[in-house]
Amino acid sequence: MKSHTTRAFIALAIGGVLTLAAFLGAFFWAGVPDFGFVRTAERTDSVRYQGPFDQEIDEARYLANFAGYDVEVVAGGETVRGDLVEADETHVTIETADGEVTVSAAEFETGRVRGSSYGRPDWGQKIFYFHVPVAEISFIVFGFAAFYSIRFIMTRRREYDIKARVSMEVTLMFVTLTMATGILWTKAAWGVWWDWEPRLTTYFIMTLLVVAYFVLRNSVEDEERRAMYAAVFSILGFIDAPISFFITRLIPSNHPVIERGGLEPPMLVSFIVAQIGMIALGYAIYQLRMGEMLLQDRIESAKTQLER
Amino acid sequence: MASSSMRQFRAMLRKDIVMELRTKEMLMSMGLYSLLTMVVYFVALSQAGAGFDPRDIAAGLLWLAFIFTSMLGLNRSLVHEKDQGCLEALLLSPVDRPVIFFAKAIGNLIFLLVVEALTIPVFAFLFLQGQSVDVSTVALIPLVLVAGSVGIAGVGTLLATMSVNTTGKDFVLAMLFIPLMYPLLLGAVTATAAAIIGGPEGMSLFWTGMAWVVGYDVIMLLASYGLYEFIVGA
Amino acid sequence: MGDEQRSVNALEVRELTRAFGVRKALDAVSFDLPPRAFLSIFGPNGAGKTTLVKVLTTLLNPTSGSAKVLGLDVVSDAVEMRKRIGLISHNPLLYPDLTAEENLLFFSEMYGIEDPQGRVAELLEAVELDHRKLDLTRTFSRGMLQRLSIARALLHRPEVLFLDEPYSGLDPHAMDILDGLIAQIRDEHTFVMISHDLDKGLELCSHALILARGKIVMFEPREAIDEPVFRETYRSTVGMGVA
């Protein structure tokens, strides 16, 4: 018993420190990635300067988006340079040093737009350091639950049932956290709270499977039968989850995928530290619950002893 | 051993069919339930407007009816065994546990297919009149029906064997059944919808959907078959 | 059934334990029962009587220890054993939507009985249900169901019969018929009966066993039983509650 609590607190301390460190790293060291590009004629403060940009335009109407930019237009063999006033299908108006010049679209040969490129900082991405480790761990712990369930079916020993159940509790916790952070991220990145997108859908199904596991447990009276049913269901669920994951690819997805080597070192280090920290936290919760369960068993057996 | 298992299997299947033909309990309740679902569909679609094409959601509606009706039937089929402790009598006899699984699952599959075969024409009559469909591709729908029903009956028999021993049978079955059935349902709806839409693109989607359903059947039926012994003996 | 098997004890239970976690339904139960004996098992609710019978009928596996029925191990020889045991429970274990005959024919198939028609007709006659064989068992009275249930249990000529409170819910007439049937087959079968009824149980048995909290409190052959002491012991266990 003592060992469970001791292990839990050691894991809690390590996990807490690592997770905190990872989050500090994520916010102050890893930097903020850019989310799309903003091109402006003039510098703006809320965005990050990326450098100048210089773009060729081959039709007059395409200039319409660049009112206020520094442009250089070649029309009828002549070059006009200045700030763009307006542009449409018929003509282009440019404010040059010598006053406004209007070029008809028919004469337009080629144009050049110059300005500055800026990155919009994607603060929503910070959720990545929490969301992804938590999601990965939830799969791992689900795997443990299935593993202990198989052990239980093979041995019919109650300790494996307890282990499977506690693993499932930890899974439920991590799945809930993944869903919650996922929903926040969806809103930040895609502008909607929910989207029936493959990963989200799979996750939703997995949440339901984990919830169903506990519904099943709560509705079986006999202790051993409950253990057996729960074990069988968690195995079925563990087989079902990956099928759900792959089949949902029938629906087109826009969920981001991390590419190999796609993370800069500060990001990668923060991410890995967060992952280790959260594994430690999950382990701490597991050990705490295990300790509690064993304590309950001891009370139970003490009661039986007293009755005799 | 194999021949005695076959004899037991036939006896169990015949018993289920005789009992069903006598009481018509499952077929009646499932058939009427699917009819009631049609009424609910009509109400649900009543405000959809004139521009709405029922073919777009026909596949989804059909499988929705099948999944809910099947849960009703699955529960019934196991309650029969449980009622007077007959399952215990079966377990006491020298019968291999998988034989019980296969006999119950095949019985459920037959009843399910009968109800589905009755539901489809009614559905088409009520919702798809005057809609043009490609007959050559629609003729493939029975394939999806059989493949999908095999999965429903197989996994469903295992889950119903569990849920029949729980408090709150129906709810527990639904809670276990629908998340587990999600991949099969998605594959089946995809394939059915593709068959209704038709065309070469529809055909390739149809076979993709079919492949998923069959793959799901193989994996989940193997798992159910392997795990049934533990459930029925617990 | 050779000569060597005849000499084998009908039941051999060794340190049989059935536990889940700290709770022990059966706690190191050991006893032997000679062939063609009649064992009555007494005990309060939750004493482990039903668990013991379930282990002996292969419906549950022991957690530790072993049990042999007719020399066959309940785990490793389960399939072989099932062909040689029968169970009569307070539950009829019959399909209400099948006729009496169909029920018996169905179970004949499960046991792989040769000439099922003949065997079923013979048994229906024995339990005096010949005239109702084409009626659904749904329409049967409790007594008739119990008789049919006995016929079902005897279909495959089992050598050991387990009776799980067979008298519960029977009217006096049905009890008499059941008594008569048991008396008829008493000599060539081994019986194991769970009972709440001390008088009935003692009247029939050749051996008596009192179980409480999964442990044997008393196991004696009938002739060694001092009835007042036995009754007192039984009464004291009833107050002990559930283990």
Image: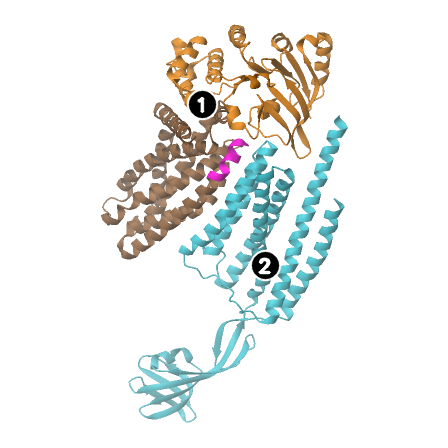
Chain colours: A cyan, B brown, C orange
Q: Nearer the viewer, residue A166 or B66?
A: A166
Residue marked by disc 2 = A133
Q: Is residue B170 above or below residue A19?
A: above
Coordinates of residue A222 in the picture (x, y in percent): 59, 31
> Are dots 2 and 1 on a single chain?
no
Q: Nearer the viewer, residue C29 or A141?
A: C29
The secondary structure type at the circle numbered 1 is helix
Q: Residues within 10 Å of mark 2 (few under 14, many from 20)?
A: many
Q: Is residue B113 above or below residue C220?
A: below
Snapshot quadrant of residue A82? bottom left
**Residue B184 visible in rendering:** yes
Task: Kindly identify which chain the residue marked by label 2 belongs to.
Answer: A
Q: Residue at x 27, y 39 (%)?
A: B121
Q: Is residue A261 above or below residue C233?
A: below
Type of residue at label 2?
A: Pro
Q: Is residue B226 magenta?
A: yes
Q: Nearer the viewer, residue B23 or A124?
A: B23
The secondary structure type at the circle numbered 2 is helix
Q: Is residue B165 magenta?
A: no
Q: Is residue C101 above or below residue A248?
A: above
Residue marked by disc 1 = C111
Q: Which residues are magenta?
A: B225-234
**Residue B53 visible in rendering:** no
Snapshot quadrant of residue A25? bottom right
Type of residue at label 1?
A: Tyr
- Magenta segment, principal secondary structure? helix
Q: Residue at x 34, y 93 (%)?
A: A78
Apparent side of residue A198 relative to residue C33 in the rendered image (left or right): left
Task: Kindly identify which chain the residue marked by label 1 belongs to.
Answer: C
Coordinates of residue C65 in the picture (x, y in percent): 65, 29
In which quadrant of the rendered image does the C terminus of chain C lie?
top right
Q: Residues within 10 Å of mark 1 (few under 14, many from 20)?
A: many
